Amino acid sequence: MTTTSPDQTGSGSAEQAKAYPKSVLGYLKAWFHALRVALNRPLAAYYLLLTSTALLLTIGLIMVLSASSVWAYTQMDNSYAIVGRQVLWVIIGIPCAFIASRIRPKHLRRLAWPGYVIACVLLFLTIFLGHDVNGQQNWIGAGPVKIQPSEIAKLGIVLWAAHVYALKERRLDSLHEVLMPVLPGIALATGLVLAGRDLGTALVFFAIVLGMLWVVGAPGRLFGMAISIIGVSVLFLISTDTERLARLTSFADPFKDYHGQGWQPSHGLYALSSGGILGQGIGASQQKWGDLPEAHTDYIFAVLGEELGLVGTLLVVGLFLTLAFALVKVARQTDRPFVRYFSFGVLVWLLGQMIINVGMVLALLPVIGIPLPLVSYGGSALIPSMVALGVVIGFARREPAAAAALKQRKALAKDRARQAAAYRSAQRNR
C-alpha cells in the first residue's frame, strides 16, 4: 500500500511542469505552478514565519550597527554600544519566542485578562511616573532599565481581544456582543496612551481594533462611523498641539520648513534618493553622520534605503508581506477561533506599524515616531513582537497536517540516522 506524506501535496507538479512549452511564458507558468504547490504544503506557513522573522532580525541587526555607529561613538565613545544592546535584546527575545511557541492556546488564554490589566496599570503609571522622551511621556523605569509600556500593551490587547471574541464566537451576530467589552477596553488603553502624548501608538491601537472588528464580521456601516470618529479625533488632537500641527502642515512638502519640522523628513528623503537601485553599500550612509535624527530607530528605513537601495527596501517590504501571507494562512486554515483572531490581530499590528513607518519615511504621513518592527532599535518593541510571532509559529506547527508532517520528518530522520550508523558499523567490522 502506498502512503503519501502530508508535506507532499501536489507531488505530480514535476510531470505537470514538463507539459508546459519551453518558452518564457511556459517557464513562468511552471514556476508559478511550483510556487503554488509549495505554498499549499502543510508546513508552508511554519517555515515562512521562521524564515521571514529570522531574515528581518538579521537585517535589523546589520542596519542598527550601521545606522547607530556614528551617534554611539559621539555620545558613548563606543561605536558598538547600541548594536550590542540590540544583540542582547535579540538573545533575550529568542528564548522568549521559543517558550511562547510551546505554550498551548488554552494555557495562553489564561493570561489574557491578567495581561490586559497589567498593560493598563503600566500605562496608567506611565502618566505620573513616566520619563519624557522627545515630547512623549511613554517610558517608565529607573536607572538603565526603562521600558515602553505601550509596546507591551499591543501584545496584551491582541491577546485579550482574541480571547474575548473566541468566547463569544457563537454570539458575534449581535452588534452589542461585537462591541462589548472589546471596544471600551481598547478605548481605555488608547486614552491612557494619548495621555502620554503618544499619538503614533494610539494610531496602531486604532488599527488593531478596526482589524479585529473586521475579522469578527462587524457591519460595514460601523467602519465608516469608526473611521470618521477616529479621523476627527486625530485632527482635534493635532490642532491642539503646536508641534503636531507643524508636522502635519509640513509633511507634504518638508522642504518648506527645512530647518524646522521638515529637517528629519527632508534628510530621510535625501537618504532614500541617494541610494539608487543597489545603494551606497553597507556602512556608507552619509545622512547618519548627524543630519538624520533617530537614524537607528524611527528612520532606520531611510538608512536602509541609502545603503541597500531600492533592492534592499523592496526586500524588507517583501519580507513583511511574506509574514502577512503566512499569518493569513495560519488564520484561515485553523478551526479554532482564538488562533484565528490572535493571528489576524498580530497581522494588523505588525503590518500596520510597518505601513505607518514606511509612509512616514517616504513623507506620505506625518512624523509620528513609530519604529519599524523587528528592524528598528529597541527592546521594548522587539521582544513583544518576537513573542507574538513565536505564539503564531506555535499555532502553525500544531495544525494537524503540519504536526503530522513534522512527525513523519522526524521518523525519517531517525531511520536515516540508524541506517548511517549501521553502515558505519559494517564498514568498521570489515
Image (spheres, rainbow, N blue to C red):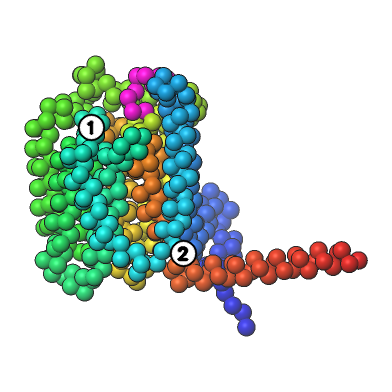
**Element at label 2:** helix
**Viewer-nearest residue: 151 or 205:** 151
Picture quarter with the C terminus: bottom right
Q: Residue at x 45, y 44 (%)?
A: 90
**Element at label 1:** strand
Can you see residue 199?
Answer: no
Magenta-drawn stretch contains 359: no
**Viewer-nearest residue: 132 or 274:** 132
Q: Is residue 122 above or below residue 420?
A: above
Picture quarter with the N terminus: bottom right
In the rendered structure, find residue 3 and report the number of the disc placed on it. none
Q: Pinpoint residue 266: horizontal percent, then vertical percent.
A: 29, 23
Q: Residue furthest bottom?
A: 1
Q: Residue furthest top?
A: 259
**For discs 2 and 1, the disc positioned in front in the rendered view:** 1
Extent of the magenta region: 285-295
Q: Main secondary structure of the magenta part?
A: loop
Q: Residue at x 46, y 59 (%)?
A: 46
Q: Residue furthest right?
A: 430
The amino acid marked with disc number 2 is Arg
Q: Pinpoint residue 137: horizontal percent, then vertical percent.
A: 21, 36
Mark 1 = which residue? 132
Q: Pinpoint residue 353: horizontal percent, then vertical percent.
A: 30, 44
Q: Residue at x 24, y 70 (%)?
A: 167
The amino acid marked with disc number 1 is Asp
Mark 2 = which residue? 397
Q: Residues within 10 Å of mark 1 (few under 14, many from 20)?
A: some
